[in-house]
Amino acid sequence: MAKIALITGATAGIGEACAKLFASAKYNLILTGRRLDRLEKLAASLNKKYDTEVAVCAFDVRDREQVISNFENLPAKWKKVDVLINNAGLSQGLDPIQSGNVDDWDTMIDTNVKGFLYVSKVVSNWMIANGRGHIVNIGSIAGKEVYPNGNVYCATKHAVDALNQGLRIDLVQHGIKVTAIHPGAVETEFSEVRFKGDKERAKKVYVGFEPLVANDVAETIMFVVSRPKHVNINDLVIMPTAQATATNIVRK
Ligand code: NDP
Ligand code: 8X3
């Protein structure tokens, strides 16, 4: 029977790259995100190319009731999830706290921390019932370091780092693996979202060095989930070669 991966935030970037790579490895997929049109298009193309079965769930991860009802309404066969990739997330703004936008803080905390928790609770209970599973949490170098004006985004990713450790402690007795992947700069829609559609400003983030691409992270996740049953990778930081720390990037 084909394995099942549930990928949050599959409409773009790292989540979309994971969907393509896991489909190519013959996983069936549950894909989530707010943009239904993108999910449907991706599902159709993966089905055509790889014969992948795809369940699409379009909802806002900040809405607890939506998370629960979308997942609980899935037919029983979809609840046999082997891999959860907890990827949906975003940054909004890059400002000092004293002039920060409080709505942006709410968006980041509600998405990256509370949404993460809502999904994790439902799916970890499925995994406990199934007696197996692997949860891969997408943290960030921002969850290992704090950089200027990164304050609240960094706090949310430090929370993901803590929750990754907490989930591992809580689920180890059930034989469920828990891993965090912490990427440095990956060129996706991330900076465009952070700068609220300012494409020029977003582009500048990746000028003068070779950033990671989403597939670099997807391949790392595939490596992590394909280790032998007795091996778990707890925590992994993946950076562009030109990036030593959150702020130390060598640009030519
Ligand atoms: P993208 O902006 O390309 O993708 C983000 C994904 O998250 C989209 O599919 C988006 O879907 C989904 N998402 C955002 N908010 C919500 C929401 N409220 N409800 C449901 N889905 C949501 O960025 P990345 O691929 O780069 O980001 C993926 C993860 O990787 C994030 O957690 C990010 O913090 C992390 N990360 C990114 C790095 C980078 O440099 N790019 C580095 C380190 C970590 P939709 O808009 O359709 O809802
Ligand atoms: C995304 C990478 O360095 O902008 O998490 O925080 S960074």
Image (cartoon, rainbow, N blue to C red):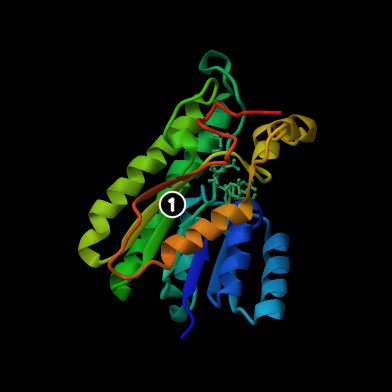
Percent x, y of residue 112: 48, 43
Q: Amino acid at mark 1?
A: Asn
| Residue in the foreground of this view, choosing between 119 and 217 | 217
Is the residue 177 above or below the residue 25 in the image? above
Residue at image position (72%, 32%) is: 208
Residue at image position (69%, 35%) is: 206
Residue 229 visible to an observer of this rendering: yes
Residue 8 visible to an observer of this rendering: no
Is the residue 188 above or below the residue 227 in the image? above
Hey, which residue is sitting farthest right in the picture?
A: 200
Q: Is residue 234 left or right of residue 211?
A: left
Helix, strand or loop under label 1: strand
Residue 34 in which image quadrant: bottom right
Q: Is residue 158 left or right of residue 152?
A: left
| Residue in the foreground of this view, choosing between 240 and 61 | 240
Callout 1: 10 Å neighbours few (<14), some, many (20+)?
A: many
Q: Is residue 233 left or right of residue 192?
A: left
Name the quadrant where ligand 2 sits.
top right
Percent x, y of residue 12: 66, 53
Residue at image position (64%, 34%) is: 194
Percent x, y of residue 154: 47, 31
| Residue in the foreground of this view, choosing between 204 and 176 | 204
Is the residue 202 above or below the residue 183 in the image? above
Count the labels in the image. 1
Hey, which residue is sitting farthest bottom in the picture?
A: 1
Percent x, y of residue 229: 31, 70
Is the residue 197 above or below the residue 95 in the image? below
Hey, which residue is sitting farthest top in the picture?
A: 98
Residue 10 in which image quadrant: bottom right
Residue placed under numbered mark 1 in the picture = 137
Residue 193 in which image quadrant: top right
